[in-house]
Amino acid sequence: MRFIEELVVEEFLPTFRALLAEDLRSRGFTQAEVADVLGISQSAVSKYAHGEVGVNDRIAGDPRVEDLVARVGKGLASGDMSPVQALVEAEVLIRQLEEGDLLADLHEEAMPELADFDGFESIHDPDSEIRTVEQVRSSVRRGLRTLVNTSGFAGLIPNVGSNLVECLPGAESVDDVAAIPGRIFDIKGKATVPGDPEFGVSEHVASVLLSARAAGSDARATLNIVYDAGVIEELEAAGYECIEFDPDAPTDPVREVLADRDLPETFVVYQSGSYGIEPITYIVGPDAPTVASVARVLL
């Protein structure tokens, strides 16, 4: 994990100071005067002068950086520019280079995971897509920890495997739903999670969640587990509304059975099987940790 601010401190600032120190020295400034203007020690200025400080060639060669160094050097030498104005001019360029520009490119190279998002703006916007996406993934991870740390959960995993899914607030398709790639399987009595949550990797459980939302539910998470009459009885005894749907219905069976109902925050839908279709129970709720905690009622 590397912050864009680290690039400013570790790449831009040493490069800018080195270039500006060289420019000021060429205008007749002594090392002491350069140190005073830059707010650093004379020994640091000496290191800049002798090339002992690393310079980022891409930053140094950017025409805007070259122009800033020349303007600031000239302004400080003539007295037309104060150190405060020089700082402001540099800050303005830094913000520009961070917003989808050179520093943003360097940041994406250091953190390739950012390439699919809008760089600086996404990272600094509290309502950005990248923040929401990562919050959903984090929620699924928390739910998974509840499941894998619950003794006996593996016994609730159906033959087709379980999946724990959670969607983005405005989810419209399975690509907006985070899930476990490859599903959760019972391997020698242990719930085994094959990978980290990803979006668009669950077709079936994600579709159940999307159908529930299309029927009017605000739910954002679903977990599928085994079905039998005892499971439903225990869930009903715990206070959860359990609604059966017909897996052979010609259209969208989950949406049809839930439509026009006053649905609680957390509820259960299930189907008792059909030819070639394994019976399954689906716990539907506001987030992954919540639906995972419901499964513990059965253990």
Image (cartoon, rainbow, N blue to C red):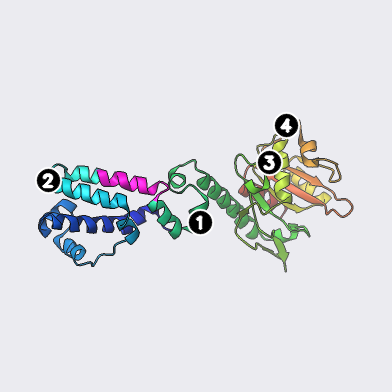
Up/down of 258 relative to 193, above or below: above
Query: Which kind of residue does numbered mark 3 sit on?
Result: Thr
Q: Nearer the viewer, mark 2 or mark 1?
A: 2
Q: CA distance from mark 2 to mark 3?
A: 71 Å
**Quarter where residue 261 is shown:** top right
Secondary structure at badge 2 equals helix
Camera sees residue 96: yes
**Disc number at residue 262?**
4
**Quarter where residue 215 is shown:** top right
Camera sees residue 239: no
- Residue at 36% over, 56% down: 7
Secondary structure at badge 4 equals loop
Q: Which residue is mark 1?
A: 113
**Disc number at residue 266?**
3
- Residue at 19% over, 62% down: 44
Residue 130: give x, y in percent of width and height: 51, 47
Query: Which kind of residue does numbered mark 2 sit on?
Result: Ser
Secondary structure at badge 1 equals helix
Query: Which kind of residue does numbered mark 1 sit on?
Result: Glu
Q: CA distance from mark 4 to mark 1?
A: 41 Å
What crowding class fits label 2: few (fewer than 14 Cα within 10 Å), some (14-19), or many (20 or more)?
few
Secondary structure at badge 3 equals loop
